[in-house]
Amino acid sequence: MGETIGFGGLSTTRKCYHRLSNEVRAVKVTKKEDLEYGERKRLLQEIEILKELDHPSIARVIDIYEDKKKFYFVQEFLAGGGLFDSLIQNVGFTENASALIMKQLLSAIAYLHSRKIAHRDIKPENILFESNDALNIKLLDFGNSRKMGENEGMSGVYGTAYYVAPEVLHG
């Protein structure tokens, strides 16, 4: 595995190369010892959700491995950087570019909802560009996601403080 390209609350993402094809990939590595029982259960739920997702605007998980100490999520490598970084750097998106980004994001959300999956942490940091020369985006980080049963409601506060809706905070 190569350089570290991202950090999360419980994981580190590193760049890597497939040995046979030499294709660039990203590997999200989570240490088992860092997981408390509830976090381990959530990670296993995330794995089950990721296995069933197939949408052009959702980061594709290629494979999932586990050894005695760690979980490894092998994902497609997204070279274009994050939407958050682009906004911070004041890249400036035209109205057409913004509409294209939103169309892709809403398509991914509609796909998730059609499969009864709630992401529960959509924010600019969880949206990456596929490459530097295109506006194709990918939604990632399904750590807070949940698959819903028929006629089942949700409760609890999930998401990131700066982005969570006020009605979620109020129950």
Image: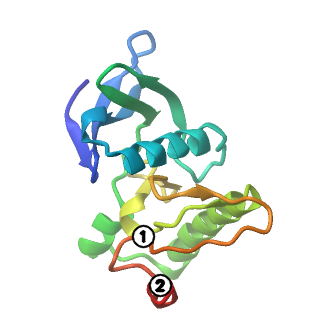
Asked whether, in this view, residue 44 is left or right of residue 28, the answer is right
At horizontal 45% and vertical 70% (from top left) the residue drawn is 158
Amino acid carrying mark 1 in the image: Gly
Q: Is residue 165 above or below residue 5?
A: below
Q: Is residue 2 above or below residue 136?
A: above
Asked whether, in this view, residue 58 is left or right of residue 157, the answer is right
List x then y, in percent, for residue 55.
65, 48
Amino acid carrying mark 2 in the image: Ala
The quadrant holding residue 157 is bottom left
**Which residue has dot 2 on it?**
165
Q: Is residue 58 above or below residue 105?
A: above
Q: Are marks 1 and 2 in contact (CB under 8 Å)?
A: yes
View extreme (top): residue? 20
Asked whether, in this view, residue 110 is left or right of residue 156, the answer is right
List x then y, in percent, for residue 151.
79, 68
List x then y, in percent, for residue 86.
32, 67
View extreme (right): residue? 150
Label 1, label 2: how far apart the Cα atoms are? 9 Å
Element carrying mark 1: loop
List x then y, in percent, for residue 11.
29, 43
At horizontal 52% and vertical 46% (from top left) the residue drawn is 46
**Which residue has dot 1 on it?**
159
Element carrying mark 2: loop
Asked whether, in this view, residue 34 is left or right of residue 117, the answer is left
Residue 134 - label: none
